[in-house]
């Protein structure tokens, strides 16, 4: 949901390997050959391109280049050795099902006699919320509803994947239980939006189906070093985004919706704590390769989970959604820089010692990146012009300023 204008998030960008990714030896950066996938997404109009007929059921968004299994196999032993640690330090951030909130706790009870009144009250409150808010709330909900993709992504990570679908390793238990907790978020927002009467649910449902079918490309390369840095960043980003939608709802007088967004943000914060703790442990036992992984992810830039979003109409839907979120302050370039600054401080990256020469360069890059991002954002804001209005199918093609 971040602004590509401010810090260059390119959802479909073709990338080359960074210096750290070509590292030899036993470091995480050792790579297997890249796998190329043809795509016309994001191609320049000035360059000739050969149209290849799509196969049946090809996703509408295709990734240009992917790298697989960049972590040397011997590093898997690190994650096996952390099994007991994960049990006592990570699984504790899960909640027992019987103590978890459920979507029905915050929605009209259709089995009660007065449910029509409850729905009418919900709709009356929803009338006070502007279209631009619903664009952001729908975008957040669609992101949450693509949960099957995120569980799949976690299960691509070498050394921590659920090998059987019901594995009893700590890593596998975490992934399934995290997914189960996250599943409530999309369910709750989906049902609220359906009851609000403000959105075109069929267009939203199509967008969800397109997004799950397209998948995501976080460029984590089956590498848990990269994967857990990505999830640390993303959980904090979703915590901030849902927190801001809660604030906007409260400002417009919809305290019930503010409560809904706030309770989801609370879950995201708890999950952020778990993922950042994993990376903190990696910095403790393998600081050189962990700081290299951190720098690698930041050079590639953190792509948002829903960056392959499509509704069957708008080829630039994710960019348009991101622009609205940036403009009204749901998720901004400043938030991106703030998250990076938080993680650098949380993991005490500036205080790392005993690094290799390459590790020190990665450390310097990460520690000096925040002010550079902020300067870019200031320049972008200074050059910003009034953006056009664009229709969103999610809200019956009503137009919203970008």
Image (spheres, grey):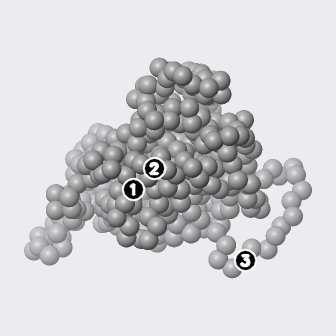
Residue 55 tag number: 3
User: Is 194 in front, or is 37?
Assistant: 37
Query: The C terminus lies in which quarter of the figure?
Result: top right
Residue 79 tag number: 2
- Nearer-N-terminus badge (1/2): 2
Residue 219 coordinates in the image, percent (x, y)? 61, 50
Residue 241 coordinates in the image, percent (x, y)? 40, 43
Q: Secondary structure at mark 3?
A: loop
Residue 321 tag number: none
Q: Is residue 58 above or below residue 390?
A: below
- Nearer-N-terminus badge (2/3): 3
Q: Secondary structure at mark 1?
A: helix
Quadrant location of residue 312? bottom right
User: Is 255 in front, or is 345?
Assistant: 345
Residue 35 coordinates in the image, percent (x, y)? 73, 59
- How far is mark 1 from mark 2, CA to CA? 9 Å
**Extreme residue toward the left, this view:** 113
Give the label, 2 or 3, closer to the camera.
2
Give yes or no for contact between labels 1 and 2 (Cβ–Cβ under 8 Å). yes
User: How many numbered markers are drawn?
Assistant: 3
- Nearer-N-terminus badge (1/3): 3
**Extreme residue toward the bottom, this view:** 56
Q: In this figure, which residue is indicated by the disc labeled 1? A: 171
Q: Residue at x 27, y 47 (%)?
A: 88
Q: Is residue 325 left or right of residue 97?
A: right
Q: Is residue 309 above or below residue 44?
A: below
Q: Residue at x 59, y 65 (%)?
A: 214
Tell me if residue 119 can be seen. yes
Q: Is residue 347 left or right of residue 374?
A: left
């Amino acid at each position: 949901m971040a602004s590509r204008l401010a810090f260059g998030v390119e959802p479909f960008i073709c990338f080359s390997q960074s210096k750290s990714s070509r590292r030899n030896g036993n470091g995480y950066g050792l790579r297997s050959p890249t796998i190329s996938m043809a795509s016309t997404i994001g191609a320049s109009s000035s360059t000739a391109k050969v149209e290849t007929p799509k196969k049946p059921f090809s996703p509408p968004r295709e990734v240009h280049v992917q790298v697989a299994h960049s972590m040397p196999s011997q590093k898997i032993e690190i994650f096996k050795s952390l099994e007991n640690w994960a049990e006592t330090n990570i699984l504790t951030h899960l909640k027992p099902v019987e103590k978890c909130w459920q979507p029905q706790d915050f929605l009209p009870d259709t089995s009660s006699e007065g449910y029509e009144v409850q729905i009418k009250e919900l709709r009356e409150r929803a009338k006070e919320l502007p279209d631009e808010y619903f664009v952001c709330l729908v975008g957040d909900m669609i992101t949450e509803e693509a949960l099957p993709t995120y569980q799949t992504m976690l299960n691509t990570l070498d050394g921590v994947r659920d090998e059987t679908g019901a594995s009893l390793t700590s890593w596998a238990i975490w992934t399934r239980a995290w997914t189960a907790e996250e599943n409530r978020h999309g369910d709750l927002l989906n049902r609220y939006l359906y009851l609000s009467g403000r959105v075109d649910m069929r267009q939203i449902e199509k967008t969800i189906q397109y997004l799950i079918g397209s998948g995501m490309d976080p460029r984590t390369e089956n590498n848990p070093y990269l994967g857990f840095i990505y999830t640390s960043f993303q959980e904090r980003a979703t915590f901030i985004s849902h927190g801001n939608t809660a604030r906007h709802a409260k400002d417009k007088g919809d305290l019930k919706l503010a409560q809904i967004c706030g309770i989801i943000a609370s879950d995201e914060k708890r999950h952020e704590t778990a993922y950042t703790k994993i990376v903190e442990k990696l910095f403790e036992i393998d600081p050189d390769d962990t700081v290299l992984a951190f720098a690698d992810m930041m050079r590639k830039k953190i792509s948002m989970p829903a960056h392959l979003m499509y509704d069957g109409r708008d080829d630039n839907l994710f960019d348009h959604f991101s622009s609205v979120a940036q403009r009204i302050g749901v998720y901004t370039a400043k938030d991106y820089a703030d998250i990076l600054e938080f993680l650098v401080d949380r993991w005490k990256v500036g205080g790392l010692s005993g690094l290799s020469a390459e590790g020190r360069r990665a450390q310097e890059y990460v520690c000096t990146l925040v002010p550079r991002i902020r300067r870019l954002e200031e320049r972008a804001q200074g050059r910003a012009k009034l953006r056009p209005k664009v229709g969103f199918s999610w809200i019956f093609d009503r137009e919203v300023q970008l």
